Image: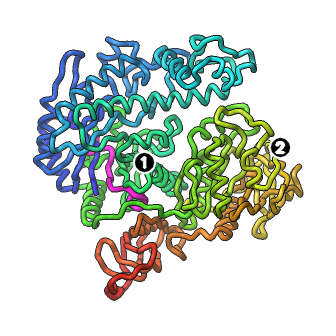
């Protein structure tokens, strides 16, 4: 298990470097990410290079038995870049420059930035490609984190070239964008600009291409650096750090270019849904590269500095949050950062080594965690352990949240609500694209799948036809990959699968656009029905509230399971079920509130046969599986006992029940399928984990 942090020795005098190495060893650190923001130290002027300090640091780390994940340092250009090459600066939608003084102040599509960054990467690679301390390469840092879109002239020129490569001719572009509307028809690619500040809505099809372009420009920067590293003889794994469900970058397209997925995750201690949301993020990054362990590259030891209020973690939460990552396939646990900064914007951000020193709760927590991770045996790679898949698609995210729709939809919030219905039941979920749906799953959930590509629709159709269970709902199968309606109206691809004919959306005034959430293991009672809008339907003998829309759908073979009890759609179908091939498809014609989502999930889970990782989990306990490893985490306020038969991974003892204190974690080997094996040692009394 890799264990460490971002290390920024360039922020500190050389006198503390030896102490850093000594304390790292004491904490159990075996790897650091080095030099992420060190460009100005490595290259203090355009024609001046200084590697001596970096040689010294890497040498000290190597002598101390600490490996290096060496960064390319390209995430924050030095001041001389902006002074000498202002054409590298990005611009906002009004065309005004973003200036230096922060970070990520570069236009990703700028040829000059790419040239300067490429030279830095080349020199680093030629110097350290074969250094025995360097075990991995860290390209850039959190691409797009602060600069979601760049509207500079460099972006303008690159956008035109990107569009010409994609569409070939301007006539094809006009057709793809539907530019006859509002007199937007283009005569040449030179007439096209980024979607800068405009009086009203931009063409939604052009916005979809613009978001694809933005993601691709960031990816091109990564690929440029990766290619330079490989050309210099780098053989170590190459990656960059993702940020979970980050809207500007389509990580599913990035994943094939990562030797290993790395991710940064910062749950908000004050968010009642933090456990659910963090579990979703970890399931997402695990699903991006199935079967390959991933790396948690950044988390906080305690408080962060960048929220309006920054409370610290409760005692034990550091282990519990770390266990969420290990449970879902992480083989590396890292922090931002090693030594807390004494100056700069992030000086209040917690670190492994706080300003208050080693006589602190934080230091005790990180050293205890390091010792516990070091004692773990080799863990199995994550497998196809989930019976349920949830469809989450970036292009759909971009399209469904555009303006001028029947209602505003917070796509991520809705996805998290449906995910929560399974998470609260201890049912493991893979997060997949529509094209990745297959019969390895028993149940597939596809919320608000507004933009559905042809290949995705074909995969979902095959899944149901071959015996799978599909659950989908409002605002799904509406537009094609160009964000245009298909001939025949709505639900034209999945209509036969669902056994439905779609008539109208039935937007509800005043209804919430999402975000109330369900299923968080620390959440309180479900929120009340939204005020000012909403409809009701009855399921499980109880009235449920729907919001956003009450769609008008007509059965064309489907069975009505529940009908609307109120509103203009009273008596019309609210939930339907349809046999298709050897499988079945469920459709809910509104977005239920928390209790409604829970009831729908319960109904469909019972019909599909999907099972939890561990039966009979007490409230507040989370369970996840990676191969034969089952991890139990008690997020509740009191100690609990869990009945589970297996072998404790840390002690080697056979157990039949585990006692978990609040924030307690247990790692157990529990084979997914019983096999003929030598007789296990006799079960011990309950193992208590605190």
**Residue 265: mark:** 1
**The magenta stretch spans which residues?**
323-340
Task: Say if the magenta span includes residue 334.
Answer: yes
Task: Say if the magenta span includes residue 131.
Answer: no
Q: Tell me, yes or no, if residue 641 can be seen here.
A: no
Where is residue 569? Give x, y as percent: 87, 51
Question: In terms of depth relative to the viewer, which is nearer, 435 or 650?
Answer: 435
Question: In terms of depth relative to the viewer, which is nearer, 134 or 200?
Answer: 134
Q: Is residue 633 left or right of residue 56?
A: right
Q: Is residue 512 above or below residue 679?
A: above
Residue at label 2? Answer: 504
Asked if labels 2 and 1 touch by Cβ distance under 8 angstroms, the answer is no
Q: Is residue 357 above or below residue 49?
A: below
Where is residue 243? Give x, y as percent: 44, 43
Q: Residues within 10 Å of mark 1 (few under 14, many from 20)?
A: some
Q: Residue at 22%, 35% (x, y): give it.
A: 233
Q: Tell me, yes or no, if residue 474 can be seen here.
A: yes
Image quarter where the N terminus lies is bottom left
Image quarter where the C terminus lies is bottom left
């Amino acid at each position: 298990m890799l264990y460490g942090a971002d290390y920024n020795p360039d922020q500190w005098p050389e006198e503390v470097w030896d102490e850093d190495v000594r304390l790292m060893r004491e904490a159990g650190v075996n790897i650091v990410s080095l030099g992420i923001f060190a460009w100005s130290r490595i290259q203090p002027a355009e024609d001046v290079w200084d590697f001596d300090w970096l040689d010294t640091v890497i040498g000290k780390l190597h002598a101390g038995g600490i490996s290096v994940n060496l960064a390319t340092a390209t995430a924050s250009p030095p001041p001389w870049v902006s002074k000498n090459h202002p054409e590298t600066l990005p611009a906002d939608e009004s065309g005004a420059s973003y200036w230096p003084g922060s970070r990520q102040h570069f236009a990703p599509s700028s040829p000059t930035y790419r040239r300067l960054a490429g030279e830095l990467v080349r020199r680093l690679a030629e110097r350290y490609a074969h250094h025995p301390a360097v075990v991995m390469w860290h390209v850039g840092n959190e691409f797009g984190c602060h600069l979601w879109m760049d509207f500079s002239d460099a972006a303008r020129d690159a956008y035109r070239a990107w569009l010409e490569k994609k569409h070939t001719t301007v006539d094809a572009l006009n057709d793809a964008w539907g530019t006859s509307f509002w007199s937007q028809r283009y005569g040449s690619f030179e007439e096209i600009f980024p979607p800068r500040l405009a009086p009203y809505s931009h063409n939604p099809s052009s916005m979809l291409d613009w978001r694809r372009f933005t993601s691709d420009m960031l990816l091109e920067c990564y690929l440029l650096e990766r290619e330079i590293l490989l050309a210099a003889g780098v053989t170590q794994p190459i990656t960059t750090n993702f940020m979970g469900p980050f809207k500007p970058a389509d990580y599913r397209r990035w994943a094939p270019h990562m030797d290993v997925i790395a991710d940064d995750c910062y749950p908000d201690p004050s968010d009642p849904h933090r456990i659910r949301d963090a579990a979703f993020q970890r399931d997402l990054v695990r699903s991006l590269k199935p079967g390959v362990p991933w790396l948690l590259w950044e988390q906080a030891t305690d408080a962060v500095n960048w929220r309006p209020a920054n409370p610290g973690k409760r005692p034990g939460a550091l282990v519990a949050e770390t266990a969420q990552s290990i449970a879902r396939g992480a083989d590396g646990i890292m922090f931002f950062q090693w030594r807390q900064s004494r100056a700069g914007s992030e000086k209040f951000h917690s670190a492994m080594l706080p300003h208050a020193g080693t006589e602190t709760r934080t230091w005790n927590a990180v050293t205890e965690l390091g010792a516990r991770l070091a004692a773990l045996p080799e863990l199995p790679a994550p497998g196809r352990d989930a019976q349920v898949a949830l469809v989450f698609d970036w292009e759909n995210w971009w399209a469904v949240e555009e303006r001028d729709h029947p209602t505003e939809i917070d796509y991520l919030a809705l996805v998290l609500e449906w995910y929560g219905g399974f998470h609260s039941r201890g049912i493991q979920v893979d997060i997949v694209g529509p094209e990745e749906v297959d019969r390895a799953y028993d149940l597939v959930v596809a919320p608000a799948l507004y933009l559905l590509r042809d290949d995705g629709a074909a995969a979902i159709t095959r899944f149901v036809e071959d015996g799978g269970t599909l659950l989908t709902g409002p605002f799904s199968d509406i537009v094609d990959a160009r964000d245009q309606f298909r001939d025949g109206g709505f639900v034209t691809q999945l209509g036969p699968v669902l056994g439905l004919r779609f008539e109208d959306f039935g937007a509800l005034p005043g209804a919430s656009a999402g975000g109330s959430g369900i299923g968080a293991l620390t959440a309180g009672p479900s929120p009340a029905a939204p005020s000012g809008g909403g409809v009701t339907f009855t399921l499980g003998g109880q009235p449920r509230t729907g919001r956003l829309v009450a769609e008008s759908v007509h059965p064309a073979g489907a069975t009505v399971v529940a009908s609307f009890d109120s509103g203009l759609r009273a008596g019309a179908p609210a939930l339907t079920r349809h046999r298709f091939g050897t499988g079945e498809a469920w459709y809910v014609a509104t977005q239920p509130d928390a209790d409604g989502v829970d009831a729908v999930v319960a109904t469909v889970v019972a019909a599909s046969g999907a099972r939890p990782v561990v039966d009979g989990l007490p409230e507040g306990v989370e369970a996840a599986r990676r191969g034969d490893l089952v991890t139990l985490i008690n997020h509740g306020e009191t100690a609990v006992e869990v009945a589970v038969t297996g072998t404790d991974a840390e002690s080697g003892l056979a157990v039949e029940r585990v006692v978990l204190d609040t924030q307690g974690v247990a790692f157990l080997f529990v084979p997914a399928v019983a096999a003929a094996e030598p007789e296990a040692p006799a079960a011990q009394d309950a193992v208590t984990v605190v």
